[in-house]
Image (cartoon, rainbow, N blue to C red):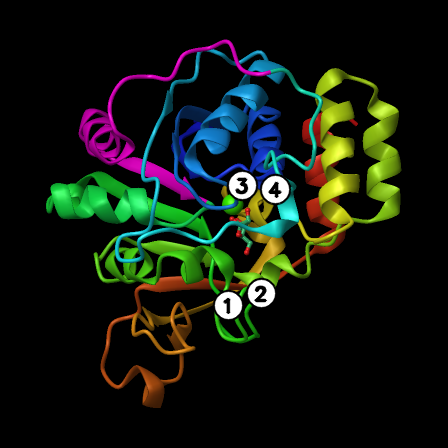
């Protein structure tokens, strides 16, 4: 089967880092052709450092890293997450990066790369600001994006940042709204499914037993990040691209609340005919996962 070439837009962040290691551990199936970074879990500078620290750990300095949005579209500054530690990688011992950043802003590079690829698959696991700005800069971008697979949102469950909104959509609700209104096919792995992708002690022990530098850092991330948020949120998006059959889904129309109320960032998911009210579905909403199969997939990618 041909490898899936994809661009990874992210805000590492410990679980973004675990998602990168999952993807890079499966070169038979996935080809990460570039990384675009957005401020989210921590500020843009540590996010950029962390993306390169992980690529250097995996000896993939060949993958270009592009700098992107330092703030959401409308808010003057984002909100960082306390879950990832001050460095964004739960206190990682990894050295500061040596590889340089690639030139060009993420939003511009998303458009350039999509046009060069003809049809680009994008995986996004941070606030969607880079994708939204790319769509504003290049109205024809949807013609060159085959799909967006994203971690974000909470369709049928409470949020984790506000009672109604998940972090990535709470940070930049307008960006999420722009993406869902773009016509690009979106697969949304929200808290509905990622809260089922739990980090277990057995998983940590198996990762520790692998003994490679990558597995050592992954198990450290699982322990330190997992102590605060024991869910593999972002790796679930990569797992979907690798093995969608381990997931359960519904199809519906997703819109995002963008007002300044407490509902900002909330997902409004219409699935029934009555709720759809004639609208065309724009999203595959992932609602369930075979957690054991997901854990096996993750550990095998680490080398177990
Ligand atoms: O709500 C979890 C999501 O927000 C994850 O992508 C995490 O990395 C943060 O970005
Ligand atoms: Ca993230």
Pointer 1 or 4: first along the chain: 4
What residue does disc 3 label? 238
**For discs 1 and 3, the disc positioned in front in the rendered view:** 1
What residue does disc 4 label? 15
Task: State the extent of the magenta-drawn residues as a range.
Answer: 96-124
Pointer 3 or 2: first along the chain: 2
What residue does disc 1 label? 154
Q: Do residues under tags 1 and 4 come within 8 Å of each other at their CB atoms?
A: no
Q: Is mark 2 within 8 Å of ligand 1?
A: yes
3D distance between C-alphas at marks 1 and 4 = 17 Å
Residue 103 painted magenta: yes
Q: Is residue 202 left or right of residue 278?
A: right
What residue does disc 2 label? 160
Pointer 1 or 3: first along the chain: 1
Residue at disc 2, secondary structure = loop
- Tag 4: Cα neighbours inside 10 Å, few (<14), some, or many (≥20)? many
Coordinates of residue 102 in the picture (x, y in percent): 33, 17
In the displayed structure, would residue 130 be above or below residue 25? below
Residue at disc 3, secondary structure = helix
Pointer 4 or 3: first along the chain: 4
Q: Do residues under tags 1 and 2 come within 8 Å of each other at their CB atoms?
A: yes
Pointer 4 or 2: first along the chain: 4
3D distance between C-alphas at marks 1 and 3 = 18 Å
């Amino acid at each position: 089967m041909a490898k899936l070439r994809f661009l990874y837009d992210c805000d590492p962040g410990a679980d973004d880092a675990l998602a990168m290691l999952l993807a890079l551990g499966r070169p038979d199936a996935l080809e990460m052709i570039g990384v675009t970074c957005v401020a989210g879990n921590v500020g843009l500078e540590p996010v950029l450092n962390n993306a390169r620290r992980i690529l250097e750990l995996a000896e993939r300095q060949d993958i270009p890293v592009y700098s992107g949005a330092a703030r959401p579209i409308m808010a003057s500054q984002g909100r960082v997450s306390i879950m990832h530690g001050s460095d964004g990688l739960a206190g990682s011992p990894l050295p500061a990066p040596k590889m340089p950043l690639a030139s060009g802003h993420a939003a511009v590079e998303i458009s350039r790369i999509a046009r060069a690829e003809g049809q680009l698959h994008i995986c996004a696991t941070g606030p969607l600001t880079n994708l939204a700005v790319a769509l504003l800069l290049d109205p024809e971008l949807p013609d060159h994006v085959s799909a967006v697979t994203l971690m974000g949102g909470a369709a049928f469950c409470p949020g984790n940042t506000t009672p109604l909104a998940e972090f990535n959509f709470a940070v930049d609700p307008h960006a999420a709204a722009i993406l869902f209104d773009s016509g690009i096919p979106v697969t949304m792995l929200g808290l509905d499914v990622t809260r089922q992708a739990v980090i277990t002690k057995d998983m940590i022990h198996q990762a520790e037993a692998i003994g490679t530098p990558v597995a050592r850092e992954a198990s450290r991330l699982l322990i330190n990040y997992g102590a605060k948020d024991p869910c593999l949120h972002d790796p679930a998006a990569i797992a979907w691209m690798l093995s969608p059959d381990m997931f359960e889904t519904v199809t519906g129309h997703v819109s995002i609340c963008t007002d300044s109320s407490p509902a900002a960032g909330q997902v409004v998911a219409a699935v029934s005919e009555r709720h759809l009210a004639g609208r065309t579905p724009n999203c595959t909403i992932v609602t369930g996962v075979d957690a054991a199969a997901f854990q096996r997939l993750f550990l095998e990618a680490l080398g177990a």
